[in-house]
């Protein structure tokens, strides 16, 4: 197989406290000997950088919009491609308008993506990048697709969901799958959704590459003998925290720590006061990866009552920490959490079901320990970032050499 000498990663904002899984994947690829440049459409504010690792990544990441704000540089980038390959340039413009979901606002966005594509493409050419991989298949992937059309640099992307599955036509998921070298789907559920929005001719390039964690980072096994619960995530409606707070009313002994931040923080804090549970709920804000690992070590049960998810990496972190988890049976989550083996799966929005699961685990330390051990084994077997990065690396090489690996994923789950 040929080897890609230099690849680049692109997403809408990198790095961010909420997307540490991308940072881990990049680090794992670099550990395999690959040179990986990082690119971000927008420049993330310093408030989203937790810990020295993220600050270091932010300092060496190329920011497309920031660079495109120089009119002279923007014109130079476009003139480069118009003068060297006018056919490709106009084909890219046609693709931008051809994937327009309609309306004045969306038309302007398509022009922005087209403008950004030239800036990104010029940077990748200057850096001698041979392949671009995108995470989150929405606007940044639109830029990646147009960049590829304009420059000939191939691209691939990791498909997560669930939000893109609510509007696949708007984001032209079908065209992105068609144009991409391959698609890394994070679960069987995710792949099935991609299949439903794409032509059968392209299904063979829909592979499964799990997001992963570094199991060695979470070496704690002893379960605290208390009534502590932990939530880690963005404080937004989709995470289901109002349901968890309602459930806590029925579990008066439980104490919850909420790690994370987001647009609903003030409303959520007000809800805890209205329910009379504010003295049992601590909002501690964003934390670094090491700090999250310490919170997992000091709490008995991890709870994630989301309404919509892909396969939450934070659940993998909790399971790698040998913690019993309580979450909702949605999308790809059951591919990670096995009911009554590594955790409890409840219906989304079911307050009684959630409070019952919390009560059961808080009073049964042996069950918590057994579930924690089972979860730890599951993550080590099927969600180790180093193994997933090796599989992704194999896909990069295989598609570059027209020697495509067979199957949805290798036998690393066996």
Image: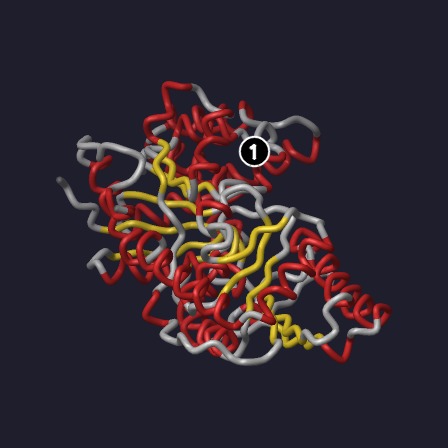
Q: Residue at x 25, y 46 (%)?
A: 414
Q: Is residue 194 above or below residue 343?
A: above
Residue labelled with disc 1: 171
Q: Is residue 349 left or right of residue 92?
A: right
Image quarter of residue 101:
top right
Looking at the picture, how far across and down is residue 260, in whole percent? 61, 68
Image quarter of residue 317:
bottom left
Look at the image and tell me in which quarter the N terminus lies.
top left
**Mark 1 element type:** loop
Could you say which is closer to the camera, residue 184 or residue 358? 358
Can see residue 378? yes
Can see residue 116? no
Image quarter of residue 62:
bottom left
Label 1 environment density (alpha carbons within 10 Å; few <14, some 14–19, many ≥20): many
Looking at the picture, how far across and down is residue 218, in whole percent? 39, 72
Q: Is residue 304 left or right of residue 152?
A: right
Q: Is residue 247 left or right of residue 188?
A: right
Q: Is residue 239 left or right of residue 220?
A: right
Q: Residue at x 64, y 71 (%)?
A: 258
Looking at the picture, how far across and down is residue 211, in whole percent? 40, 52
Q: Residue at x 71, y 49 (%)?
A: 349
Could you say which is closer to the camera, residue 294 or residue 18? 294
């Amino acid at each position: 197989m040929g080897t890609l000498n230099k690849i680049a990663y692109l997403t809408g904002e990198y790095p961010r406290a909420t997307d540490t899984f991308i940072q881990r994947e990049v680090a794992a690829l670099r550990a395999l000997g690959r040179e990986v440049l990082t690119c971000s459409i927008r420049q993330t504010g310093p408030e989203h950088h937790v810990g020295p690792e993220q600050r270091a990544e932010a300092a060496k990441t190329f920011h497309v919009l920031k660079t495109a704000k120089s009119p002279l540089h923007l014109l130079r980038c476009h003139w480069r491609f118009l003068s060297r390959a006018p056919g490709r340039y106009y084909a890219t413009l046609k693709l931008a308008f051809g994937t327009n979901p309609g309306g004045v606002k969306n038309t302007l966005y398509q022009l922005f993506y087209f403008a950004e594509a030239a800036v990104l493409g010029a940077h990748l050419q200057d850096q001698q990048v041979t392949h671009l991989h995108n995470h989150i298949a929405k606007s940044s992937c639109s830029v990646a697709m147009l960049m590829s059309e304009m420059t000939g640099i191939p691209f691939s992307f990791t498909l997560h969901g669930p939000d893109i599955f609510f509007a696949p036509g708007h984001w032209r998921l079908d065209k992105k799958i068609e144009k991409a070298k391959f698609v890394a789907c994070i679960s069987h559920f995710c792949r099935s959704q991609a299949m439903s929005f794409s032509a059968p001719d392209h299904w063979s390039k829909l592979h499964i590459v799990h997001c992963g964690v570094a199991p060695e980072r979470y070496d704690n096994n002893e379960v605290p003998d208390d009534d502590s619960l932990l939530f880690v995530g963005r404080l937004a409606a989709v995470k289901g925290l109002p349901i968890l707070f309602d459930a806590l009313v029925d579990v008066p002994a439980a104490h919850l720590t909420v790690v994370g931040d987001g647009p609903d923080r003030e409303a959520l804090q007000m809800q805890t006061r209205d329910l009379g549970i504010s003295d049992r709920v601590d909002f501690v804000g964003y934390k670094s990866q090491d700090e999250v690992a310490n919170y997992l070590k000091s709490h008995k049960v991890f709870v994630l009552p989301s309404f919509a998810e892909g396969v939450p990496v934070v659940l993998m972190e909790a399971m790698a920490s040998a913690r019993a988890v309580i979450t909702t049976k949605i999308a790809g989550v059951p591919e990670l959490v096995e009911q009554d083996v590594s955790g409890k799966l409840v219906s989304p929005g079911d307050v009684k079901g959630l409070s019952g699961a919390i009560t059961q685990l808080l009073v049964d330390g042996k069950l918590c320990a057994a579930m924690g051990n089972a979860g730890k084994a599951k993550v080590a077997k099927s969600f180790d970032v180093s193994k997933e990065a090796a599989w992704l690396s194999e896909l990069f090489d295989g598609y570059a050499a027209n020697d495509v690996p067979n199957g949805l994923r290798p036998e690393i789950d066996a």
